[in-house]
Structures are given as structure tokens and as C-alpha cells.
Amino acid sequence: MTKNAVRMWIETARPKTLPLAIASIITGAALAAWSGKFNWTITLLCLLTTILLQILSNFANDYGDHQKGSDTAERIGPLRGIQQGMINAEQLKIGLIVVAIASLCCGALLIVVAYQNMADLLAFSLLGVLAVVAAITYTVGTKPYGYMGLGDLSVLLFFGILGVGGTYYLQAQQLNFAILLPAIATGLLASAVLNINNLRDIEQDRKVGKNTLAVRLGTENGRRYHCLLLIVAMSCYCIFNIVYVQKMTAFLFVLALPWLIKHGVFVYRHKDPLALRPMLAQMSLIALLINGLFSLGLLLS
């Protein structure tokens, strides 16, 4: 395999989106530590499984869009490997299968290490299979849910509620509804990253029938929706800390507020999709920064 081919596979994995996977696991692990329960092995296996699922979703997205003819020359985002001819559809399909198997194997190992009873074993086995199916069917299949505007809901669920909540539960072995607030906040920030992608490609997606939530809302409402995601996410973190933590050190995450506000104002004011190209990576890193500071604040509290 040539150096260019390796680089193209790395780009297809979209490393700029991987901070989202890392953010959800960091937050879930910090919440477990805050509850007096923490396990390095479970945390690392959660992290590896989530990263593999994110890469699987990215591979499937490229493959599904290519099969449906959605990746045209009008696409504003970076050219994908399959668009440039560096990777063909059959190779990408094989890569997709390999990553899917790796995700299932890693998830199975995680469950074996973490489960405490048969209910845990069955529930997390089912969730693991559903996560793989959801990663693939975002754009692959006859009725991909990403083409119906359900991608944001899926991101909220898997990168927020299940990502954070699952990491917490596998270590703490208890349900704590208080963690729904930071879990939802993490998912909303991840949804903001997806929304940037969809706002950037809104015109091309509309032409090819990819009815993302941004397409359904329209450009103006899509930008308002983006700001709403950021506001509600920060509100969830604040409410959690005020009600449950009640320590000033828990508010470290507000240090990221200037970057978040600057990002939100930029997205709201700039209507040119080309201007949004660098915003995806920026939003991904801001989400990681906020979750990292939130987690550190929990540990210090």
C-alpha cells in the first residue's frame, strides 16, 4: 500500500470527528469516578470501542453516499478517498466490514470484562449490535435514516446518552438519572458538529434528496438551531453542577465559553457554506475541551 493510499484511508476515517468519541468516554468515566467508581480497563475498552464505531460510521457514510450518488463535484467539504479514486467501492466495503468486526470484538471484550449479571450481558450485547447497525445504516440501505433527518437524534443518543451513560454504568453498576444532564449536553455538542457538516453541504444535499435536519430547517433556522444546541448544552452542565456538585471547581468548563461563543456567533453570521469548512474541526475540538474541563472539574470536586 502506497503512502498516498494510507493517507487516504486515514482521511476516510475522519480523525477530526474522533474527539467526539473521546469526549463522551471521558465524561462518562469522570462521572463514574465522581461516584467513587472508576476502572481503567473498562474506560480504555469503552474508548477503543467508541472510536471504532465512529470510524465505522465514517466509512459507512462515504460508502452510502457514493452508492446513492450524493458525493458530487459540488460538495464543499474535503474530497473523500472514494471521490478521488484512491479507494474504490469494493475496497471501502471490505474496510467497512473489517472495522465492523473489530467493533463487535472490542465491544464483546468490554462486556465480558464489565458485566455483573445476565441482564447486563444481554442488554449491552443488544446495545452493541444496535450501535453497529446504526453506524452502518446512517447512509447505507434502502431507507437510511441520515437521509430522513434523523442523524441528529442518533448522535444525541449514541454520543450522549448511551456513550456517557454506558461508560458510567459499566463502572458504577448503578443507574443515576442525574447523569442524564451531562450525557445530554455531550450529545448536543456532538450534534452541533454534525449540524456544521450538514449546514456546509445543505445545497448539495437538497439537490440529491438527502433530507438532513439542516435541509428540513433551511439555512436560517439551521443556524439558529446550531446556537440553540450550544446554549442548551451549556445549560445542562450548569444545572448539573448547581444541583448535584455544588462546588466552584466544577465550573472549570466555563473557561471554554469564549471560544464557544465566538464559534456560535461566526456560524450564525456567516451564510456562505465555504466559510463553515474549518468550523467542523473547531466545533469537535471545542466539544472535547468542554467535556475535558467538565471532567477535570468533577475530579477536583
Image (cartoon, rainbow, N blue to C red):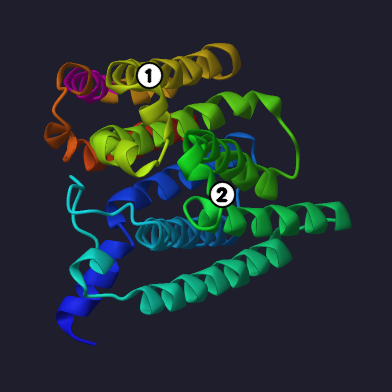
Left or right: where 224 falls relative to 183: left
Identify the residue position indicated by label 1 in the image: 225
Q: Tag 1, which secondary structure?
A: helix
Q: Tag 2, which secondary structure?
A: loop
- The location of residue 80, given as percent across then percent down, is 24, 61
Identity of the residue furthest to the bottom in this view: 1
Q: Name the one closer to the observer, 77 or 66.
A: 66
Which label was assigned to residue 35?
none
Left or right: where 16 falls relative to 96: left
Identify the residue position indicated by label 2 in the image: 143
Identity of the residue furthest to the right in this view: 118
Residue at 16 percent across and 77 percent down: it is: 4
Q: What amino acid is found at the position of numbered circle 2 in the picture?
A: Lys
Relative to 259, say whether 151 is above or below.
below
* Residue 130 among magenta residues: no
| The magenta segment | 257-266
Q: Residues within 10 Å of mark 1 (few under 14, many from 20)?
A: some
Residue at 61 percent across and 68 percent down: it is: 104
- The location of residue 154, given as percent across then percent down, is 54, 40
Residue at 22 percent across and 75 percent down: it is: 86
